[in-house]
Image: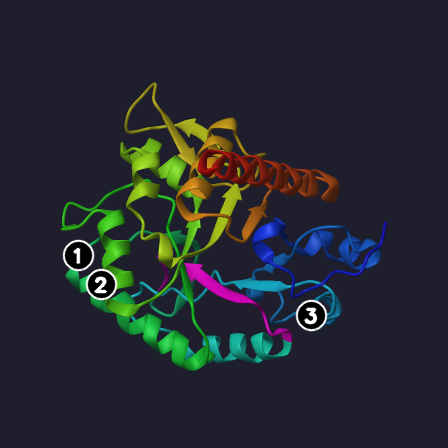
Amino acid sequence: MAITMDRHANLAERTGIGLRLPHIAEVVATRPNIGWLEIHPENFLANPHATELLLDLARDYAISVHTVGISIGSVEGIDLAHVRRLRALIERLDPILVSGHLAWSTHNGAYLNDLLPLPYDDEAMGVVSTHLAQVQDCLGRPYVIENPSSYVAFTSSTMTELEFLNELVHRTGCRLLCDVSNVYLSGHNMGYDPYGFLDGLPPEAVTELHLGGFTAEEDEATPGAALLVDTHATSITEAVWDLYAHAIRRFGAKPTIVEWDSDLPELSTLIGEAARADRVRDRTTEGLRASAR
């Protein structure tokens, strides 16, 4: 049933979905009852028809912009021409949040189709802090940083990922997008407690939450062991739903997006995942209120 959404409603009360191009025409036609929409702007920069559909949706839904090409951790510097292109789209959309990854993805002027890890040390902190300021200055608005999915660690690191994120917030005042699924799979891959990781994040800095599916693959470095890969190609696992409930207990109800990027299901499946996130949030917050009483 088509509805008219209040794009200024409290986003923490309704889960949104990542809007991918194969679903956009159906969303425009049906106006599903979902909380809000998050897009990868790079999918729209050279696609004027999709952009017009997106602008139509922006009249009814709050839109969040989640970048994948800024490469904030690159020692080669930020591509400010790309950031200016993003700003032109952002100014047309007036999104409620703009975010990106704690990662790098450029080398010798070429964009790599991956989000690559950083060493967690003072040099990387300086690079990320400087680039964050440049991006925010160019966009004219805050840029929220997402924790990465982790598969390897650098022997040169002098901080843990958690310590790095806390120090980044301390130095820059930035806000964080906590990808709960990334916390779970990184904890598995890197051998840390995901619940302890959430407990260690500064709650006042967490602005948004992500949920997505991952795939278990054989770890070639450790035969017989599984490596969890952030594919966004499956439904959310029970263990991540449990961790999401803990995130709500830790941070309170936060605007949440369900991501699904590969092997896309029917739109109804994605909406169902968002509805389950709503139920988990409501059940958890009601439990907190009951405990307080």
Q: Which residue is mark 1?
A: 121
Q: SS class of the residue under badge 3?
A: helix
Q: Earlier in the sequence, mark 3 or mark 2?
A: 3
**Is residue 135 in view?**
yes
* Residue under the image location 41 percent in, 79 percent down: 80
x and y percent of residue 20 in the render? 65, 54
Badge number at residue 46: none
Depth order, front residue of 65/286: 286
Q: Identity of the amino acid at label 1? A: Asp
Measured Cα–Cα span from mark 3 to mark 2:
35 Å
* Residue under the image location 66 percent in, 53 percent down: 35
Depth order, front residue of 36/107: 36
Q: Earlier in the sequence, mark 1 or mark 3?
A: 3
Q: How many numbered marks does the figure carry? A: 3
**What range is drawn magenta here?**
93-106
Horizontal relation, residue 177 to residue 191: left or right: right
Q: Which residue is mark 2?
A: 125
Depth order, front residue of 156/32: 32
x and y percent of residue 12 in the render? 56, 53
Q: SS class of the residue under badge 1?
A: loop
x and y percent of residue 289 in the render? 51, 39
Q: Identity of the amino acid at label 2? A: Met
x and y percent of residue 260 in the render? 59, 44
Give the residue at the far top of this rendering.
Answer: 224
Q: Identity of the amino acid at label 3? A: Thr
Q: Which residue is mark 3?
A: 51
Measured Cα–Cα span from mark 1 to mark 2:
6 Å
Tell whether label 3 touches label 1 (CB within 8 Å). Answer: no
Q: As displayed, is residue 230 above or below residue 146?
A: above
Q: SS class of the residue under badge 2?
A: helix
Horizontal relation, residue 139 to residue 274: left or right: left
